[in-house]
Image (cartoon, rainbow, N blue to C red):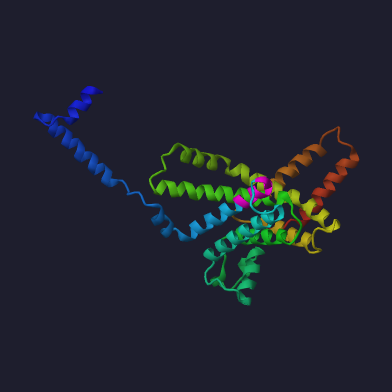
Amino acid sequence: MVEIREESTERHDGSGASSSGAGHSGDSGSRNLPAAKSYSQFVSENMSSSILCFTRLLTLYFAFSFVFPIFSVVSYESAYYKTLAAAAATYLLRLKDRVTNFTFSREFLMSLVIEASVLSLFCRRKTYRIPDTDSFHYFIYSTLFMMSAPVTMALLPLVLYAALQAASFLVKMFAETGHGGNAWVLKLDHFTRMQTQNCLGIIACAEIFLVPIVISMLFMGKGSLLMPFIYYRFLTLRYASRRNPSTRQAFFQMRCSLEQVASSPSCPALIRNMIHKSIALLSSWAPPVMG
């Protein structure tokens, strides 16, 4: 250690030339590396993504305030509806960024409904084609639960999506601003990559388990008459989603589990028949999946 330090500081004989040569090679190597951006420069170059990250962080903050009202500056119910409002704003902004010629005209809304119904192959106006229908699905989801009594499980898909997408954006921001090598940034990146599929599975199961809750809310007077029908439509859109097949996978895994229970010799005949009839009924309700 001491000898290396002294050799690098001495300027006589050949040591100075070697050290200067090493310095030039280090300088040339550093020139090849991209210069780190400042935070303001990164935000200005990624303005729309930065705004989306901000609304997702708002979603997480209000969800935390809803779960732990003792730390909240707003009321319990206000935090719930603000969470849904922040999520709805996120998906509306994301939808606006991904749709060309975004307007609120009747023609645009009709093409939006057609695309959301997974019938875009029959849409003649390619100008209004929506490449990411998941944003529209969760915009419907957020606005639907804004018109009903608070349901804690309804926040789970929105919170997990907001956490995953905000974490991915923050990792990208720290990487481009020269802080990507920090230990906690690397851990956040690794955790996000490893847990994404698990979170998608949890989201899909939560959306499925919300069906009996939505139906019970109708009989308890906490939801509108149209709420179960709109939620069924949302669930069919998630099932037919071409970008995210996690809902289809969750239904398939549940079907395999029920068929395994029904095939057991210890399963009563009545339960076995009920399982098979339920599977047949739900399969008949499943929408077609377009590639």
| Residue 217: % across, % down | 81, 55
Of residues 114 and 206, the one drawn nearer to the viewer in this rendering: 206
Instruction: Tell me if 148 is positioned left or right of 197 in this view.
Output: right
Give percent across and percent down for residue 277: 84, 49
- Which stretch did the figure color magenta? 60-70
Question: Quick check: is 65 in the magenta stretch?
Answer: yes
Whether the magenta-drawn stretch holds residue 183 is answered as: no
What number of labels is visible? Answer: 0
| Residue 136 visible, this orientation | yes
Could you say where residue 244 lies in the image, as x and y percent from the top left?
61, 52
Residue 188, how many percent across, how many down?
51, 41
Q: Residue at x 52, y 69 (%)?
A: 100
- Kindly indicate the quadrant of the structure image that contains residue 227: bottom right
In which quadrant of the rendered image does the N terminus lie?
top left
Q: Quadrant of the C terminus?
A: bottom right
Would residue 240 be seen by someone viewing this image from the given angle?
no
Q: Residue furthest bottom?
A: 106
Q: Residue at x 76, y 59 (%)?
A: 148
Front residue of 270 and 247? 247
For the residue pair 218 and 234, the one nearer the viewer reads as 218
- Specify the principal SS of the magenta part: helix
Identify the residue at horizontal 85%, vertical 56% (top origin).
220
